[in-house]
Amino acid sequence: MDHIEFVLPEEIEKRSFAIISEELEKKNITIRPEQEMVVKRVIHTSADFEYAKTLTFSQDAVETAKELIRNGADIVTDTNMGLAGINKTALARYGGNVHCFMAEKEVAERAKQRRVTRAAVSMEFAAQIKKPLIFAIGNAPTALIRLYEMITEGVYRPAFLIGVPVGFVNVEAAKELILQTDVPFIVNRGRKGGSNVAAAICNAILYELGR
């Protein structure tokens, strides 16, 4: 117990971010100011400092995402875990909602018929929403691949892409496809990511808006 630090509950997050800042400084890692809170919140969620090097942002990505949310954009995720993790109350202040179509019966039926993943089909369902969408993909590379196909085919263009699926099969390749598009993005290169990371990025942007 000698090494346990007593921190009041309301101070735990603040202390965590202070530690992250201290460790980044020790590692001589400098983050661009407009990207700082996104990177730090992902590190806070994962306790993994590699994200400071692998998170990749299109030009003015954070400000673009903020402007979309201010104007009422919705967020689409590829997992119910991501859906649960995004601060829906904060998003609703700007007129936005969060969607996940993975559990829809029709999505499952179509995926089975076409022998594709539910994640790919759920992107097609999301594309029917008639408002700007931020896609927060934390699990399924097939979701990113389907979005890339729709973009290149000219049938649909997302307003913003957060591409941070985790895993081994097609994960890195799917992320690299998104970097080739002209859609604003935040992508984590490499194998790491997850629904928690996707939600953390969304929340970082939402909390920045509320400051």
Image (tube, grey):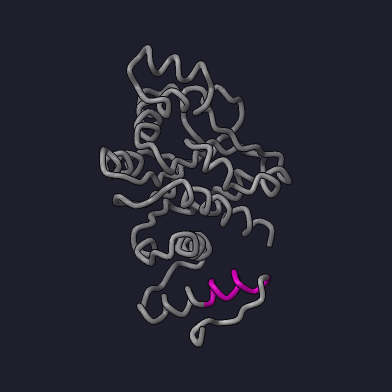
Residue, x 56% and y 57% (percent of image)? 204
Residue, x 38% and y 61% (percent of image)? 51
Q: Is residue 132 left or right of residue 8?
A: left
Q: Residue furthest front?
A: 1
Residue 13: name its quadrant. Answer: bottom right
Q: Is residue 1 left or right of residue 29?
A: right
Residue, x 58% and y 53% (percent of image)? 203
Above or below, 120 relative to 159: above
Looking at the picture, tell me which residue is in the foreground, 143 or 186: 143
Residue, x 37% and y 12% (percent of image)? 113
Q: Residue furthest right?
A: 93
Q: Position of residue 184 (x, y in %)?
A: 45, 44
Q: Position of residue 147 (x, y in %)?
A: 40, 30
Count of numbered circles on the image: 0
Above or below, 114 relative to 157: above
Q: Magenta stretch?
A: 10-18
Which SS does the magenta portion mostly show?
A: helix
Residue 148 lies in the magenta stretch: no
Residue 13 lies in the magenta stretch: yes
Above or below, 28 relative to 171: below
Looking at the picture, tell me which residue is in the foreground, 133 or 11: 11
Q: Position of residue 178 (x, y in %)?
A: 36, 40
Quadrant of the frame with the C terminus: bottom right
Q: Is residue 130 left or right of residue 210?
A: left
Looking at the picture, tell me which residue is in the foreground, 38 or 196: 196
Q: Position of residue 11 (x, y in %)?
A: 64, 74
Above or below, 154 relative to 72: above
